Amino acid sequence: MFCFALNILLNTTFVQATALGTQAKEQKITVKASIKPVLDMKIARAGSSALIENLSLTPSLETPLLYETSQAATISTLGYDSGHRFKISLSKELVLELTKKGQKDEIRDARVLFKGQDLTVNNPIEFTPDNNKIEGLLKIIAKVTENQKVGVYSGELILKVEEVA
């Protein structure tokens, strides 16, 4: 059996979005994944290439083609009423596409969890900020197939954050 590893680079930036007449903030995270025998992950600071931390990506013992990684994440709610709750969801599903010239392949089976809860497009999760921030573990779980092409895969993970009045 051939083993795969995902090398994921998370790079965060902030963009503005308007939803139903209210101002929503989106946190855009560029995810790059390469399938190779080396298991590591690099996370960069927003707007910079300086690394925050190196993490190991390990396959699940029960499911050999399942890879996951996690990173402590903070979503700032400064500028909002600190007594309000917030809804967090995915702006679009996470799809990783092969970036190798002349080849096409995708990893479509990827889950995103924040604070242990599945983030999806259509089911926002409510959170209460503590000291103008929401802190928790951001986890990405990707499932590859046995015939997945080797190469670097990339895609965008966009978290949508809305204030609940």
Image: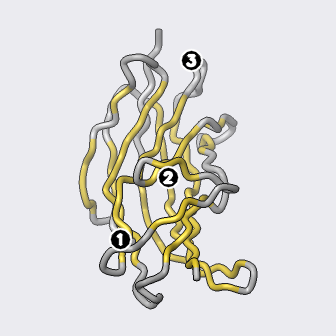
Residue marked by disc 2: 31
Secondary structure, mark 3, is loop
Rendering coords of residue 158 (x, y %): 57, 62
Classify residue 149 by image quadrant: top right
Q: Residue at x 38, y 26 (%)?
A: 59
Residue marked by disc 1: 48
Which of the pair 7/116 is nearer the observer? 116
Q: Earlier in the sequence, mark 2 or mark 3?
A: 2
Give the CA separation, mark 1 to mark 3. Answer: 35 Å
Residue marked by disc 3: 146
Give the CA separation, mark 2 to mark 1. Answer: 15 Å
Pointer 2: residues within 10 angstroms few (<14), some, or many (20+)? many
Rendering coords of residue 21 (x, y %): 73, 86
Rendering coords of residue 108 (x, y %): 64, 38
Q: Amino acid at mark 3?
A: Glu
63 to 46, vertically: above or below? above
Pointer 3: residues within 10 angstroms few (<14), some, or many (20+)? few
Q: Are marks 2 and 1 in contact (CB under 8 Å)?
A: no
